[in-house]
């Protein structure tokens, strides 16, 4: 009887230890690499054909340059604390104030689509828009999420020619974004 109880306790301890170790880490999807740094409280997986660039509070990825030259496509993921009244905002309120900056930056700014989604279980919004800089037309997709007074912003930028080729990388990152 004592052996049986000891074995049962050992099995329960092993199960609890295994569950504790697997707490927040998710399995790395095939064909991806993990992006994180000590300055941020998130990580994500991105296509392994892309390169990562780390900075304080931000991680960016870009397609690996091909023999044809540098690609003007990128995805950046940043986080920063909201101050004052902004700390109590929802993501759509944040977008409404942010949109004014876009309208001033791009004379031809046009919102093309918006939807709601979850970023690692937290409510988020996805906004798709166009705008031109120095005579080059760009398409943007931004995902915004507010968690514990911090805004998380994922920004996909591509010119018209590269948009369709690289937009699936954004979906890979959004689907595989996790808070630590």
Image (cartoon, rainbow, N blue to C red):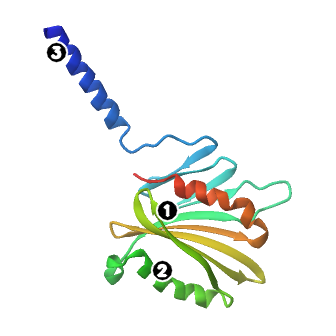
- Badge 2: residue crowd in 10 Å (few <14, some 14–19, many ≥20): some
Q: SS at mark 2?
A: helix
Question: Dot 1: what SS?
Answer: loop
> In the figure, is residue 4 to the left or right of 151?
left
Q: How many marks?
A: 3
Name the spot of residue 83 as percent of width and height, x first: 35, 78
Q: Which residue is mark 3?
A: 5
Instruction: State left or right for residue 7 relative to residue 167.
Output: left
Residue at position x 66%, y 53% in the image? 51
Callout 2 touching callout 1 (CB < 8 Å): no
Locate residue 153, reporting x and y percent. Answer: 50, 68
Residue for point 52% across, 71% down? 115
Secondary structure at numbered mark 3: helix
**Label 2 vs label 1, nearer the camera:** 2
Q: Which mark is residue 95?
A: 2
Q: Earlier in the sequence, mark 3 or mark 2?
A: 3
Residue on which disc 1 sits: 56
Question: Dot 1: few (<14), some (14–19), or many (≥20) neighbours within 10 Å?
Answer: few
| Mark identifier at residue 71 | none
């Amino acid at each position: 009887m004592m052996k049986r109880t000891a074995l049962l306790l050992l099995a329960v301890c092993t199960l609890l230890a295994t569950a504790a170790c697997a707490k927040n880490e998710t399995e790395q999807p095939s064909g991806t690499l993990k992006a994180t740094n000590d300055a941020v409280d998130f990580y994500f997986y991105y296509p392994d054909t892309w390169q990562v660039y780390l900075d304080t509070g931000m991680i960016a990825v870009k397609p690996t340059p091909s023999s044809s030259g540098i690609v003007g496509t990128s995805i950046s993921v940043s986080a920063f604390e909201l101050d004052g009244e902004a700390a109590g905002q929802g993501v759509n309120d944040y977008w409404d104030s942010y949109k004014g900056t876009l309208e001033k930056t791009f004379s031809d700014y046009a919102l093309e689509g918006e939807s709601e989604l979850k970023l690692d279980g937290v409510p988020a919004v996805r906004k798709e828009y166009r705008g031109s800089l120095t005579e080059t037309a760009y398409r943007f997709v931004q995902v915004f999420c507010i968690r514990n007074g911090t805004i998380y912003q994922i920004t996909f930028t591509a010119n018209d020619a590269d948009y369709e080729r690289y937009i699936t990388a954004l979906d890979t990152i959004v689907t595989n974004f996790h808070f630590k």
